[in-house]
Image (cartoon, grey):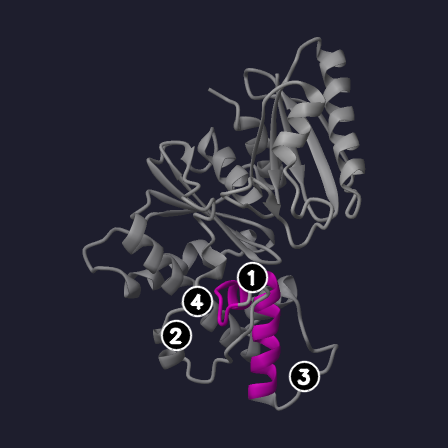
Amino acid sequence: MYYGFDIGGTKIEFSVYNTALECVFNERIPVPAEDYEELLDALDKFIFEADKQFECKGLVGIGYPGVMDSETNTLVCSNLPSLHGQNLQNDLEKRIGRDVKVQNDANCFALSECFRGAAENADVAIAVTLGTGVGGAICINKTILSGHNFGAGEFGHMAIPGTMLQRHPELPVTHCGCGGHSCLETYCSGTGLAALYKFYKLHIDGSCSEEQALKGPDIIAAYNANEAVAVKTISVFLDILASALGNLMMILDPDVIVFGGGLARFDALYTKLPEQIKAYVFSNMKIPALKQAEFGGEGGVRGAALLNYK
């Protein structure tokens, strides 16, 4: 059996998959956000109870919201204090007496889509999650590209190209939680889209009350209703995203780009974005397939289980 954990900022999700990759057990609990020992207790309880239920010693994979320090193998999880600075892999292995594989949650999402998902037949796949932030991952021949510092695929923290400030000179220079400026996620995440709408509401109408400061789904609804500020906001949002994906195409030349996260259901990502990317790549390049993730919210925990799949 393959055991998968998806550890997030608010919950731990645990699933068990059989050799046919069918989910035979799933449960969620609130994540111990401050107490590391309590978090370890929760993980090994799930593991030992599943061992007993399925009469096996399951293979364990864990997705976490952060990156790993390449020298110490400790986790950098700024949004989850209980995991930050901890060597989860080593500590859990000692408790349960078996190997544990750990990986960034966006990488797990990408891996899931490479096995019977939207990237099933891709030699090179890029996964982009458009949620609270912008996450990313690269899979080559169904294998995660982690990189020298375990930081490959952190597209959300690329600075947007200078051409964007030329094309949209009114754009604000943003400050990102990573310490950088004008990172992609400050414009193209759900949070970034809301901030962009508020900026253009002020820029166009001169004011923006709390009631007028829309969030992602409402901005998309307003765009579909042809509301002027939403149309402008989405136009710039898509242009910035197209330029970023064009840059990734020039580096990786992927077969497919898979979208996950709360904004992945936005139709314009699949109807308008492919044409807009053409402005940022060689004229002879074919645009890869742009697809919505097939496994949705299950992707993280399923991908964690797949870390041990052969």
Which residues are the magenta region?
180-203
Q: Which mark is residue 164?
A: 2
Read off the residue under disc 3.
Answer: 208
The residues tagged by marks 3 and 2 sit, at their Cα atoms, a distance apart of: 24 Å
Read off the residue under disc 4.
Answer: 159
What residue is shown at x 42% (from left), y 84% (from top)? 169
The tag earlier along the polypeptide, 3 or 1, is: 1
Badges 3 and 4: C-beta atoms under 8 Å apart?
no
Decide if residue 209 is on the left or right side of residue 17. right
How many residues crowd around disc 4 within 10 Å: few (fewer than 14), some, or many (20 or more)? some
What residue is shown at x 57% (from left), y 42% (from top)? 105
Q: Which type of secondary structure does the marked residue at label 3 adopt?
A: loop
What residue is shown at x 58% (from left), y 80% (from top)? 199
Q: Quadrant of residue 208?
A: bottom right
How many residues crowd around disc 1 within 10 Å: few (fewer than 14), some, or many (20 or more)? many
Q: Nearer the viewer, mark 4 or mark 2?
A: 4
